[in-house]
Structure formats: C-alpha cells, structure tokens
C-alpha cells in the first residue's frame, strides 16, 4: 500500500507540475532571450542617441567662441587699433572709449550665459596685455592670478588652431583670498593680419556641463565622458565606473562605434561618437552587469514562480493522493467483505470526477456480481442439501411403498375383495408414489389437489366425523403450477392443533384465488388458535435457520417457498385465540 501511495503521489505530482513548469520554463527562457536582445539593441540605440544629443548640446555651448572669432574677423580695423592700444604705455581717453566697445563685445555673452565663467582676448603685444570679461579694462599678465593659460597658448601657438584643457582658475574673492574655479578652457587662434595674431580663451564652468550630464537618464554605473585625442578626460558625469588612461586610449584608437571590452573593473559595452569640430570623442561606458538588471529581475521572478508552482503542485498532489488512498481503502474493505461473504459496507465517495465515477461503476458492478455469485452458490448449496435430505427421506418411504403393496394384496385376499384397510393402503400408496416421483419442483394445481385429497381420506378414516374439509376455487385455476406437497403440511398443522379440542367439530376451508400475477392459497380453520406470545415466537422461528419440532411442516414449507420463488413469494400466519388460524400463501404465476 505504501508503494502504491508513493506511485500515486509521483503520478499526481507530475500531472500538476509538468503543465505548470513546462510553459513557465519556456516562457522564462523566451522572455530572457528576447529581453537580452531588446536590452542590447535598446541600450545601443539609446546610448548613441544620448551621445548625439550630448555632442550637440556641448558643441552649442562652445559655439560662443565661433561667434567671437567671426566678430573679430568682421571688425579687423577695431582689433588693429586694439593692438596699438595694447602697445601704448598709457592709452588715451579715446582709446578707452573704443576699448569699452570691445569690452561690451566679450562681456555680453559672459553675462548672458550662466555656463560661461570668463572670456579672454589676447593680441600679441610687447606689454603682454589682454582684455578680460572679469576686469574693467586692460590687464597685464601677473596682475591676475590666472596666467597659466598664456603658457598653454605659447606652447600650442604654432601648430594648433583649437585645443582644450581642463583647468582650475585661481581668483580673488571679496576677502582678497584666492579661490579656484573648475573650468574647461577652449583656446582658438585668430588672425587680424599676417603679423597680427592672437587667441580667444573661453572658460566654461565644468560644474554646469557635468550637471547636465548627470541629468541624463543613464543606466546604473554608466559613464558619460568627453575625451581629447590624448586620452585625457575633459569632463564626465558622476558615475563610479572609471577607465584607466591606457584603456581610454585603447577605446579612442578603436574605429568601431560600439565595442565590448574587458576593463580592469568589469566587462563593459562602450559606444563612441567623434566630434571633428573640436577633435573630441564622446564616450558611453555601460557595465554589462547593469544591462541585465531587468533580465536578472525577470529570472528571479521566474525562479520564485517556479518555486510557487512546485509548492502548489506538491500540495495538490498530496491532497489528491490522500483522496486516492482513501478510495483504495474503501475498495479494499469492499473486496474483503465480498471475499468473506459479508454484506457490502456502506460508503460515500466525495469525489464527482470522471475517474472516481468510473472506479465506482466498475467496483459496484464487480462487487455486485461477485456478491450475487456468492449468494447463488449459497442458495445452490442449500438446495442441494435439501435435495440430499429428501433423497435420504425417500429411501424408507420407497421400502414402505413396496411393503404397503404387499399388505394391500394380503388384506384383499382375506376379505375376497376391497375393504376399508385396502382403501387406506391405496391412498397411502398414492401419497408415497406422488412423493417419490422425479418431479421435485412445481406441479399443476389439480395434481397437487388430488394428492392432498388422498391425504385427507386417510385422516378421515382415522378421525371420522371430527373434522370437515371443503375446497373453494374455480376450475380454471387448476392449470397453474404450484409447489409439490404445499397443502399437506398446512392441513396437518390444522388437524394437529385443532383436533386437540374435543367439544367442537373442526372445520377447515381451503380457498384458492388469483390476484393479478399472484395465486393466493389460504388454509383456514376454527381451532383453538395461537396466543399472541406464541405467535411472536412462531414468526421469529419461521424466518430463522433453527428448527422447531412442533412446527416442522410450516418451517419446511416456508424454506421451500423461499428457495423456489425468492422474495416474490409470501407466507403469512394470522390467528386469534379461541377463534382459529389463517395460513395465507401468495405465489407468483406467469
């Protein structure tokens, strides 16, 4: 039973688990594959769009320098005069008026644009003077703490038109203390004439640009940076992910817009856009780990769902196995009862599924068939036992029959003809012959009546006029079959108990009637009757297996009727003390 239960549990578990797990695994794998493809393609597209947008925005910030350069080219005369003013020991009042016009030219964008820290314009002059958006007039190198820009200019003056540096500008605050401003400085050469050259210095606030970069929607740990050709980072967002100088140089040297590279930190997906205007490279570095955050979350959800599906399948399999085990116990109890010949145990199945209905139907048919076979075997056994007992009882009557024939001839020989004794012997011989013939079952009613009359004739010779018997029936009923020797035990019972009273003549009436498919045989007498207590005892013994010496004829008749007709027959006894007794038998007829 334990092995069967385990098999049921495994079968039920697979029945519930496979339909849940297979679609879930396929869906999870497909979702993971599609998500991976979508993430990679989506990140590539988003990063390239982000880099293009960043490139356009940053280039727009530095376009102020182009406007300054165009204005210088368009105002050649003014800037030629500016060089003269820069070379003079002391500018005149007229020079200061013209200087004010030029100052407005560089102060206007500095004031209007919050991202511009300062603008310098320098023309080569002997006094190393320049004009600045942070001062009111000319300023000489050394008067302002910021003078490193001039060194960079001299270093790049002969071979580069535009270059960029990341610098910290020293400045005096209101307390005459030096503070540093973090800026990105862009240098641009300009030429007023062949021998008049200079530089425009545009200082952009780093904080402003990096704040703009940080405002962009990036993946977790994604680095956005702008790098020059030397691999130096000009500015970047606040991402913790960093590349070394060698790694940055390797990225710049790559000609592909998207590469995957194993860095010192982690494997990363890198996208690039090159700016020809400023010779910059805009770079996006996305750690692969952050690319698959959604995929990892999806896999975790899938794992949780699988665990939940497993638990649900275990619970359902346990409940179904418990139910199947209960049904098996019921089946075993029914089989054991059928095997031992006991009545089928009552049970109620709570299930109403097809599987349970099939089991109940097959089981009910099998058990009922088996039970009926047992009952039939028992009935056949009882019939055979009764027949065997009848055969045994026939041995002595057969011998007696032959002896009676001898007595008949001897008695007739003594009187030279029939006499009362020969009449008794003839009736007794008829009764014995009727009992010993081969028909042990049903006989026509007229044959049974004739045999019963022979028995009554013998009893008349014995008791004389102490009783009267008369018949009441229609002749058309004589064709129906009845059980052999069915009247004799009933009449004998009436005579035995009715003739014990000597003060009244016994009257016995035998009434035969038909009611539909039933034939009613009634034996009615006016004897002493039966008391109520004795009646209860008689009815109890009549339908039990115990024998009763006082009513053996009635008990035998009841059992023979049950064996021949089953539940379709009925034997009923009614009696009133001092009034008489009625024995009523109903037999089915066809």
Image: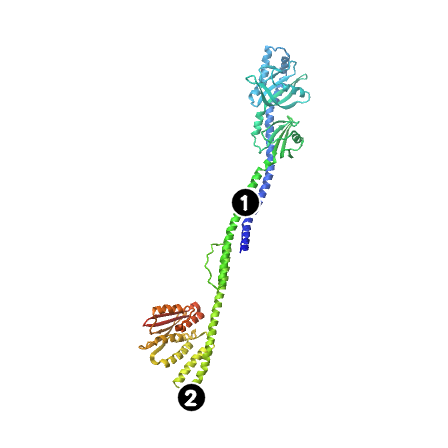
Q: Nearer the viewer, residue 218 or 93?
A: 218
The residue positioned 34% from the left and 80% from the top of the image is 465
Is label 1 in a helix, a strand or a loop? helix
Cα gap from disc 1 to disc 2, whole angstroms: 111 Å
Q: Is residue 212 above or below residue 495?
A: above
Q: Is residue 286 above or below residue 310?
A: above
Horizontal side, residue 311 vs residue 81: left or right: left
- Residue 588 spot, x, y in % from top left: 42, 70
The residue positioned 61% from the left and 32% from the top of the image is 285
Horizontal side, residue 571 vs residue 172: left or right: left
Please state, as top left, top right, bottom left or bottom right, where the C terminus lies in the image.
bottom left
Q: Is residue 274 above or below residue 385?
A: above
Using the rendered view, name the quadrant where residue 159 is placed. top right
Q: Nearer the viewer, residue 121 or 102?
A: 121
The residue positioned 47% from the left and 71% from the top of the image is 383
Marking on residue 320: none
> Is residue 122 something that shows in the picture?
yes
Q: Earlier in the sequence, mark 1 or mark 2?
A: 1
Farthest residue, direction left: 503
Residue behind mark 1: 307
Residue behind mark 2: 413
Q: How is the image coloured?
A: rainbow
- Residue 377 spot, x, y in % from top left: 49, 68
- Residue 284 spot, x, y in % from top left: 61, 32
Q: Nearer the viewer, residue 67 or 160?
A: 160
Is label 2 in a helix, a strand or a loop? helix
Q: Is residue 409 above or below residue 365?
A: below
């Amino acid at each position: 039973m334990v092995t069967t239960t385990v098999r049921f549990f495994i079968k039920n578990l697979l029945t519930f688990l496979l339909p849940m797990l297979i679609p879930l695994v396929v869906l999870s794998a497909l979702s993971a594959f599609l998500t991976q493809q979508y993430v990679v393609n989506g990140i590539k597209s988003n990063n390239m769009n982000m880099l293009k947008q960043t490139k356009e925005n940053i280039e727009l910030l530095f376009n102020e320098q182009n406007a300054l350069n165009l204005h210088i080219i368009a105002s050649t005369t003014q800037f030629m005069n500016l060089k003269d003013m820069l070379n003079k020991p002391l500018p005149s009042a007229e020079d200061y008026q013209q200087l004010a016009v030029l100052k407005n030219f560089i102060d206007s964008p500095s004031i209007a644009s919050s991202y511009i820290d300062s603008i310098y314009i320098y023309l080569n002059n002997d006094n190393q003077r320049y004009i600045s958006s942070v001062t009111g007039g000319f300023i000489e190198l050394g008067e302002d703490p910021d003078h490193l820009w001039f060194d960079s200019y001299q270093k790049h003056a002969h071979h580069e038109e535009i270059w960029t540096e990341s610098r910290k500008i020293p400045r005096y605050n209101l307390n005459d203390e030096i503070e540093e401003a973090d800026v990105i400085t862009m240098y641009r050469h300009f030429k007023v004439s062949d021998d008049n050259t200079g530089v425009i210095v545009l200082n952009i606030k780093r904080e402003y640009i990096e704040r703009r970069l940080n405002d962009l929607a990036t993946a977790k740990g994604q680095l956005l940076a702008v790098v020059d050709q030397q691999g130096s980072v000009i500015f970047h967002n606040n991402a913790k992910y960093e590349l070394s100088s060698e790694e940055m140089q390797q990225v710049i040297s790559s000609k592909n817009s998207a590469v995957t590279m194993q860095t010192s930190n982690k494997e990363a997906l890198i996208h690039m856009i090159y700016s020809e205007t400023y010779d910059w490279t805009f770079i996006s570095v996305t750690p692969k780990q952050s690319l698959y955050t959604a995929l990892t979350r999806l896999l975790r959800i899938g794992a949780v769902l699988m665990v939940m599906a497993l638990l649900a399948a275990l619970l359902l399999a346990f409940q179904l196995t418990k139910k199947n085990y209960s049904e098996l116990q019921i089946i075993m109890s029914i089989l054991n009862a059928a095997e031992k010949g006991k009545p089928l145990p009552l049970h109620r199945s709570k299930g109403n599924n097809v599987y349970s209905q099939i089991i109940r139907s097959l089981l009910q048919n099998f058990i009922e068939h088996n039970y009926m076979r047992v009952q039939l075997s028992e009935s056949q056994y009882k019939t055979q036992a009764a027949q065997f007992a009848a055969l045994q009882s026939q041995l002595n009557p057969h011998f007696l029959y032959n002896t009676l024939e001898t007595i008949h001839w001897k008695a007739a020989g003594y009187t030279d003809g029939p006499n009362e004794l020969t009449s008794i012997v003839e009736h007794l011989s008829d009764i014995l012959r009727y009992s010993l013939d081969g028909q042990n079952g049903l006989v026509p009613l007229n044959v049974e009546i004739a045999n019963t009359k022979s028995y009554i004739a013998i009893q008349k010779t014995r008791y004389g006029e102490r009783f009267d018997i008369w018949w009441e029936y229609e002749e058309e009923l004589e064709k129906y079959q009845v059980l052999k020797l069915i009247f004799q035990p009933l009449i004998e019972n009436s005579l035995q108990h009715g003739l014990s009273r000597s003060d009244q003549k016994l009257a016995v009436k035998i009434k035969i009637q038909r009611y539909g498919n039933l034939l009613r045989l009634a034996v009615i007498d006016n004897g002493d009757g039966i008391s109520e207590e004795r009646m209860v005892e008689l009815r109890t013994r009549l339908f039990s297996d115990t024998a009763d010496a006082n009513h053996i004829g009635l008990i035998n008749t009841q059992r023979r009727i049950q064996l021949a007709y089953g539940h379709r027959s009925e034997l009923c006894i009614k009696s009133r003390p001092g009034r008489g007794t009625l024995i009523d038998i109903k037999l089915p007829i066809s």
